[in-house]
């Protein structure tokens, strides 16, 4: 059974430069009832964040993109806006460098698209629970 059923309205930003992997992630998100915003470059992802940042609940980031580009600028912008993300990468050789800098949950490639999407959804739900607890603590003061 898919744990992520019932997430209609959730928006997931996908940053992945491999077209087939991106397509699999899109289908998995849609199968769960979530909306996928897809991008293959930092520039495209940052544009989506700028245009639809309020709607984005969580992101899935590939670390190494084409043309020696990494997801770092996108991860920093998501962090600045308080949007949670997970890392989906096959570039584990750079684990000590880039991935540790991101301080995010890592799912190594290859991984089933539904596992990646379910993990992202769980991250979004955890973030919402944390926000609710913060709000309740602030209201109680």
Image (tube, rainbow, N blue to C red):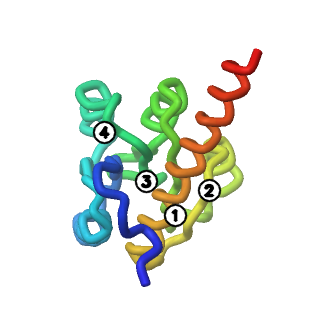
Q: Check disc 3 and report the residue beneath it.
A: 60
Say whether disc 4 or disc 3 marks the residue closer to the N-terminus.
4
CA gap between label 2 and label 1 equals 9 Å
Which residue carries the number 4 mark? 45
Count neighbours of disc 1 (C-alpha within 10 A) and say few if under 14, some if 14 to 19, many if 20 or more: many
Which image quadrant is residue 23 in?
Answer: bottom left
Q: Is residue 130 above or below residue 104?
A: above
Q: Residue beneath label 1, please? A: 119
- Nearer the observer: mark 3 or 1; the answer is 1
The residue under label 2 is: 105
Position in image of residue 25 (x %, y %): 31, 66
Marks 4 and 2, how far apart in space?
19 Å
Picture residue at 64% right of the left edge, 39% below the top: 130
State the SS at label 1. Answer: helix
**Which mark is in front, 1 or 4?**
1
Q: CA distance from mark 3 to mark 2?
A: 10 Å
Q: Which sits earlier in the primary sequence, circle 1 or circle 4?
A: 4
In primary-sequence order, the first of circles 3 and 2 is 3
Q: Nearer the viewer, residue 74 or 51?
A: 51
């Amino acid at each position: 059974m898919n744990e992520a059923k019932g997430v209609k309205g959730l928006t997931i930003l996908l940053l992945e430069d491999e077209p087939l992997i991106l397509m699999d992630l899109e289908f998995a998100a849609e199968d769960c009832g979530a909306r996928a915003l897809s991008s293959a470059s930092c520039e495209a992802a940052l544009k989506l964040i700028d245009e639809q940042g309020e709607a984005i609940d969580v992101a899935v980031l590939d670390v190494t993109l084409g043309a020696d580009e990494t997801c770092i600028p996108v991860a920093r912008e998501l962090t600045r806006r308080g949007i949670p993300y997970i890392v989906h990468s096959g570039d584990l050789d750079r684990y000590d460098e880039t991935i540790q800098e991101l301080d995010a949950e890592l799912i190594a490639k290859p991984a089933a698209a539904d596992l990646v999407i379910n993990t992202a959804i769980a991250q979004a739900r955890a973030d919402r629970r944390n926000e609710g607890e913060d709000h309740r603590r602030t209201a109680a003061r």
